[in-house]
Amino acid sequence: METSGGIVAGLSGRYATALFDLARAQQAVDVVTRSLDTLRTALADSADLRTLTTSPMIDRAAAGTAVAAVAKSLQIDDLTAKFLGVLAHNRRLSALPAVIRDFARLNARSRGLVTAEVTSAHPLDAEQQAALKAKLRAGLGTDADLILHVDPEILGGLVVRVGSRMVDSSIRTKLNSLATAMKG
């Protein structure tokens, strides 16, 4: 089997690699990807879920019970639900956002794509995503799999990260640069 090849590292990389290898062995990569996308959205939308994944005050048993209920309510596939149980048992739920990101990188690499993390002030619609993918394909010479984040604090524009490269065209950064320039 192909290894992560340095595209993921650390604790989240190990967990993501384990999940990816299991999903690939069970021919369930697409199903797990959809479940992880659902979890990413739920984490962004639910303060309660974020608290569940980050609070050190929630013990293993309670965390395990809670993630099982979350998985059921979000209709998460069995493999991903069991994986969430392992994270809860090992007290590693706080790594979930990084595991989701690293899984996406592994999946993109396995399909011959690069992963682009894109932060925007507002959600990008399908047309905007297609246009961004076309620009990235032209600039990178290969297709890109988008991981989308919304951060209203950037005010507008985009922050795009591909590997170690970053393009920050956010209005917040432009305003900060202007303020610095005006200070002289």
Image (cartoon, grey):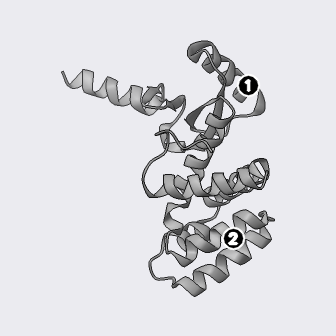
Residue 182 image position (x, y, % from top left) = 25, 22
* Residue 111, picture quadrant: top right
Point 46% across, 40% down: residue: 6
Q: Quadrant of the C terminus?
A: top left
Residue flagged by tag 2: what amino acid is it?
A: Lys
Residue 166 image position (x, y, % from top left) = 44, 28
Give the number of the mark in front: 2 or 1.
2
Callout 2: few (<14), some (14-19), or many (20+) C-alpha neighbours within 10 Å? some
Above or below: residue 62 compared with residue 164: below
Q: Nearer the viewer, residue 85 or 127?
A: 85
Point 66% across, 33% down: residue: 145
Q: Nearer the viewer, residue 72 or 167?
A: 72
Residue 174 image position (x, y, % from top left) = 40, 25
Residue behind mark 2: 82
**Total residue callouts:** 2
Point 48% across, 25% down: residue: 169
Above or below: residue 42 compared with residue 87: above
Q: Nearer the viewer, residue 111 or 116?
A: 111
Point 74% across, 49% down: residue: 29
Of pointers 2 and 1, the one earlier in the residue sequence = 2
Q: Element under label 1?
A: helix
Above or below: residue 15 compared with residue 9: below
Above or below: residue 98 compared with residue 130: below
Residue flagged by tag 1: what amino acid is it?
A: Ala
Q: CA distance from mark 2 to mark 1?
A: 34 Å
Residue 44 image position (x, y, % from top left) = 61, 56
Residue behind mark 1: 130
Q: Nearer the viewer, residue 78 or 116?
A: 78
Position of 22 with respect to 175 (left or right) is: right
Q: Element under label 2?
A: helix
Position of 179 with respect to 139 (left or right) is: left
Callout 1: few (<14), some (14-19), or many (20+) C-alpha neighbours within 10 Å? few
